[in-house]
């Protein structure tokens, strides 16, 4: 799938799944359910929207294994070098990062950062905001450096808005895990499939007559508009008056 499709599906997954997941009870030390939900203090309207943006960015993380991809230029040489490192570690495009194991590991890692290392958490948040913006086409066609500068400016602006609205990040690991996994699900619907059970090499893919052809008219002219409308609908549903 193309970048904007992944980002849109990440946002949809968050808006659809976060509220019911937040309502799930936690276990206390005596192994009894308590009334406080998993994200009871992290679902203000601002945090729901921030989560959608960050989950959209997380839905791009698996494609950091592709240094030639547009998102690798998000922050110029910084993200390009990161992409080169990810590609080398994962064994190339659609390798280890396109798996259930990666989604779980990156989600747990983000949760740990959010709980223990605020600076690391903020770096990840900034990266994910930038990936989301780049995926939906923020930039100047044919101008890598200018696009990176535009993206840096808009990312900084959004992050400042999150700070001003006291957005908390208790949900960061969940958003990152969901976004990464929804990317894998999406790519399993394309003609190439993904090694979902990596390190096993078998790839999960729909039959070629059903699978989505990446970048073709269906994805650009039909799927992307439908997903965009779905996001607007979910926002009205989650944030509108009861």
Image: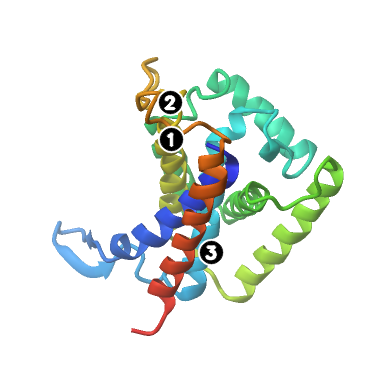
Please report whichever mark, 2 or 1, sits nearer to the chain's N-terminal start: 1
Residue at 73 percent of width and 60 percent of height: 154
Q: Is mark 3 on a helix, strand or loop?
A: helix
The percent position of residue 115, horizontal first and vertical second, equals 47, 55
Q: Is residue 25 above or below residue 92?
A: below
Q: Residues within 10 Å of mark 3 (few under 14, many from 20)?
A: many
The residue under the point 67% across, 65% down is 158
Q: Can residue 113 be seen in this view?
A: no
CB atoms of marks 3 and 2 within 8 Å? no
Q: Which badge, 1 or 3, comes first in the chain's sequence?
A: 3
Q: Where is residue 183 in the image (x, y as percent from the top left)?
A: 46, 39
Q: What residue would you read off at disc 1?
A: 184
Can residue 61 be seen? yes
Residue 219, relative to residue 169: is it above or below?
A: above
Figure colour scheme: rainbow
* Nearer the observer, 126 or 17: 17
Quadrant showing the C terminus: bottom left
Distance (Cα) linking label 1 and label 3? 22 Å
Residue at the far bottom: name it. Answer: 241
């Amino acid at each position: 799938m193309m970048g904007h499709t992944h980002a849109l599906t990440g946002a949809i997954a968050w808006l659809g799944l976060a509220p019911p997941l937040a309502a799930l009870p936690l276990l206390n030390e005596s192994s009894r359910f308590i009334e406080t939900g998993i994200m009871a203090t992290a679902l203000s309207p601002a945090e729901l929207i921030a989560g959608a943006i960050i989950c959209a960015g997380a839905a791009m993380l698996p494609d950091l294994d592709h240094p030639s991809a547009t998102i690798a230029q998000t922050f110029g040489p910084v993200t390009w070098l990161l992409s080169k490192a990810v590609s080398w570690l994962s064994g190339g495009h659609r390798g280890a990062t396109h798996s259930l194991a990666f989604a779980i590991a990156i989600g747990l890692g983000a949760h740990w950062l959010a709980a223990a290392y605020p600076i690391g958490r903020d770096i990840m948040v900034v990266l994910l905001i930038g990936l989301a913006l780049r995926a939906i086409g923020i930039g100047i066609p044919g101008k890598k450096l200018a696009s990176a500068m535009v993206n840096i400016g808009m990312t900084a602006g959004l992050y400042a808005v999150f700070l001003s609205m006291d957005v908390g990040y208790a949900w960061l690991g969940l958003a990152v895990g969901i976004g990464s996994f929804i990317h894998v699900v999406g790519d399993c619907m394309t003609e190439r499939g993904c090694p979902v059970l990596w390190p096993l090499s078998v790839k999960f893919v729909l039959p070629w007559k059903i699978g989505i052809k990446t970048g073709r008219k269906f994805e650009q002219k039909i799927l992307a508009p439908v997903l965009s409308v779905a996001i607007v609908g979910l926002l009205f549903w989650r944030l509108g008056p009861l």
